[in-house]
Image (cartoon, coloured by chain):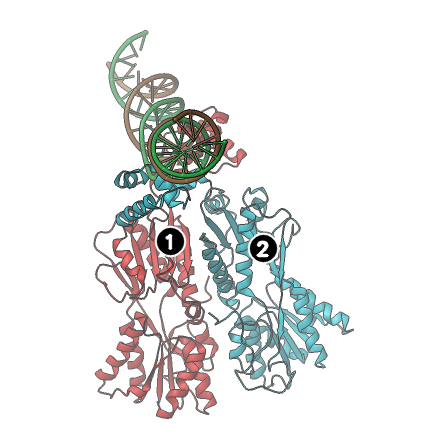
Chain colours: A cyan, B red, C green, D brown
DNA sequence: TCTCTTTTTGGGATCGCTCCCATGAGTCTT
DNA sequence: AAGACTCATGGGAGCGATCCCAAAAAGAGA
């Protein structure tokens, strides 16, 4: 079933059917209706490959999340939320979304070739690509446009990316704890191979330094962004008597909270706790978490729009889009007297829509 | 850059280059090496559209999750886990994955057309497609193979699907509670528009009936698969004095647990609690949850393999694949004396790999 | 050395579209 | 009423692969 056979049935030419399908204005209303009727009747679908062959665009965007399953599921639904944002925007922009989840190793030649095939997608979006990734080098040679979500670690200037100012956000979180009178503030970092984690650690150090507080390296512990490692990190920290903890995300904060409770300490009375992301879990802990809200879905949406602009040649210089974050004060930091539970601001990201 | 230009540089013909690319055995080793060198040198990528046009296959599988963001994120990572399973298997089978997330409404003609375009994907996988969905009707007319994950509500016989025996699993969970001497067993159901939820409810009723226990409709409450509604459902149940609760998933169970604790009751002493899925959260509650483990990732993997078999014409009759579930006994049901925390079986799905 | 078979190679036809140009029909102008 | 102009339509060329068949080259057997 092709254009020609539809044309024959409608008593017109191939070209006219093509015009109808592509909403060309130069078709008489009468003809258009006749053709549309036949198309409907025959349940005709134009061949995407043939179209792509001549138009040199597939109307497909590629999304690559070279994230291990481990991180994908533990990190606060961060990646699923990014995905949702991407998916929404890409659908709205009338593209389809081709997806690769999971680690991409250098040895996976097949996949590497496919990813860099400029004929398969019109552009690519990479989410949290580590700097030492073999794809990185390939990217530079790539002729097709691409956008990164989260700041790349190297070659920052020439890369289009969408991120938040993690350094500033971490400064604000830490500063908040300092203003509450805390002096021994610990930090449970995320995976330090990820730029965001590094930046948050930098922000944490900046804030302490700015306040003239000493930086005690024993108060800095790494985690894997998940509950379990948050719990263990806190157990490591407790002997050094911190009076506050800034955690790399809300799930880690929840794990830390568990360890704190098991040690017979109270939050926020004995320790103040601040998380990051502001997702569901921040409201499910007891007490609910003070945290930094970042617009996770919006990151995905923005990246998709940016990529499409790039594809359409609307941009010249590389774009660096920095989305805003916000400190959400709840009970776990002890900043103010408890408000009625559930009465405070909810995340814009988690359950909305 | 096309086959022809590579051919010219290598001093061979178009056809020979094509043979090299497609691993045809009828190429001399010498020629193959020469051509491969040029391909590498020029960073040549064959045009996927041109290939698809003549081969009549795109090597792309479509995955449709017509799930609202609400359910996507609340339901125990169920959908992200399915996705991971699909992604792994599809990559391994050397296909690419085209994805549509989120609700697909009848009015979204554009998307509907795209989904049913047999030239875009070689086959489709639908995850938890509600029975009243407009896509359902379109599917029947579809000429391309498709597989569903989770039992469809109607037209079951003619549909290829992968699921678990939710009825039986719920019977086992409920039976377990009965054997522990519980008599007023409540059920927090999931969204009843989803077949799985219905089946679990049926299994619950079956078990009570088989044990000669009365079915008290006040002990059955619906939830949205998330913490919040699990919490509220439990609050509704408490006045009717249940001595056990079978929850539709682990997150709902966690929400219920919170409500139980707030009411000053203890688990498992005052109430036994059983969840469903066996994901991370089941180990993060205190006490850890007794639950039904279902192989979520394996569902995705199985569906992908089934679809590829279907595409290759290896199957004739519609396939119904039912994967096994397992009762995982931990502390929340009170079945045995507490084992050391963390020492019990972990989910095969959550953090592995 | 010549024939017969097998392996390797080359080039035409084809897939189903879009693009471009030519043509015909209808309208407006002078 | 003829030329100029617009709008609707038709058909050739071409996108870049694969497939098929024919031809050339290499190897085998007598």
Q: Secondary structure under badge 1?
A: strand
**Which residue matches tag 2?**
A130
Q: Is residue B85 above or below residue D28?
A: below
Q: Is residue A316 above or below residue A242?
A: above
Quadrant in which residue A214 is drawn: bottom right
Q: Residue at x 37, y 88 (%)?
A: B237
Residue B338 appearing in the image:
no
Neighbours of disc 2 within 10 Å: few (<14), some (14-19), many (20+)? many
Q: CA distance from mark 2 to mark 1?
A: 28 Å
Labels 2 & 1 near each other (Cβ < 8 A): no
Locate residue B229, reporting x and y percent.
42, 79
Locate residue B290, reporting x and y percent.
38, 78
Looking at the rendered structure, the number of numbered marks drawn on it comes to 2
Q: Is residue A235 above or below residue B116?
A: below
Which of the labelled discs sits on residue A217, or is there none?
none
**In the depicted view, which residue is nearer to us: A25 or A282?**
A25
Neighbours of disc 1 within 10 Å: few (<14), some (14-19), many (20+)? many
Locate residue B271, reporting x and y percent.
38, 88
**Which residue matches tag 1?**
B62
Q: Is residue C30 left or right of residue A1?
A: right
Q: Is residue A263 left or right of residue B216?
A: right
**In the depicted view, which residue is nearer to us: B272 or D16?**
D16
Using the image, name the chain to which the residue with label 1 belongs: B
**In the depicted view, which residue is nearer to us: B175 or D15?**
D15
Locate residue A28, reporting x and y percent.
36, 43
Say whether mark 1 and mark 2 are on the same chain: no
Residue B101 appearing in the image:
yes
Q: Is residue A207 left or right of residue B301?
A: right
Judged by depth in the image, the label closer to the viewer, 2 or 1, is 1
Using the image, name the chain to which the residue with label 2 belongs: A
Q: Secondary structure under badge 2?
A: loop
């Amino acid at each position: 079933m092709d254009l020609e056979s539809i044309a024959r049935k409608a008593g017109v030419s191939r070209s006219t059917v093509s015009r109808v399908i592509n909403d060309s204005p130069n078709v008489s209303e009468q003809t258009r209706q006749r053709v549309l009727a036949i198309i409907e009747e025959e349940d005709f679908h134009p061949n995407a490959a043939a179209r792509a062959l001549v138009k040199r665009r597939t109307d497909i965007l590629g999304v690559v999340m070279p994230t291990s399953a481990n991180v994908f599921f533990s990190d606060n639904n961060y990646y699923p939320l990014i995905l949702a944002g991407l998916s929404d925007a890409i659908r709205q922009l009338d593209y389809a979304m081709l997806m690769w989840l999971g680690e991409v190793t250098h040895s996976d030649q097949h996949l590497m070739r496919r990813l860099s095939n400029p004929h398969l997608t019109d552009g690519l979006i990479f989410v949290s690509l580590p700097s030492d990734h073999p794809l990185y080098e390939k990217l530079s040679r790539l002729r097709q446009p691409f956008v990164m979500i989260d700041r790349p670690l190297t070659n920052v200037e020439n890369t289009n990316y969408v991120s938040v100012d993690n350094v500033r956000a971490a400064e604000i979180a830490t500063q908040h704890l300092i203003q509450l009178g805390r002096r021994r503030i610990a930090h449970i970092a995320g995976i330090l191979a990820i730029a965001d984690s590094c930046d948050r650690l930098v922000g944490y150090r900046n804030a302490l330094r700015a306040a003239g507080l000493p930086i005690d390296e024993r108060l800095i512990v790494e985690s894997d962004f998940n509950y379990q490692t948050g719990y263990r990190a806190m157990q490591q920290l407790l002997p050094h008597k911190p009076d506050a903890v800034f955690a790399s995300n809300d799930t880690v904060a929840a794990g830390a909270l568990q360890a704190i409770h098991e040690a017979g300490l109270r939050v926020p009375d004995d320790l103040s706790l601040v998380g990051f992301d502001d997702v569901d879990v921040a409201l499910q802990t007891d007490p609910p978490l003070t945290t930094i809200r970042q617009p996770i879905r919006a990151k995905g949406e923005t990246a998709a729009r940016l990529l499409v602009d790039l594809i359409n040649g609307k941009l010249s210089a590389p774009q660096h889009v920095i989305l805003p974050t916000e400190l959400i004060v709840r009970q776990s930091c002890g900043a103010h007297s408890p408000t009625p539970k559930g009465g405070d601001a909810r995340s814009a990201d988690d359950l909305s829509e």
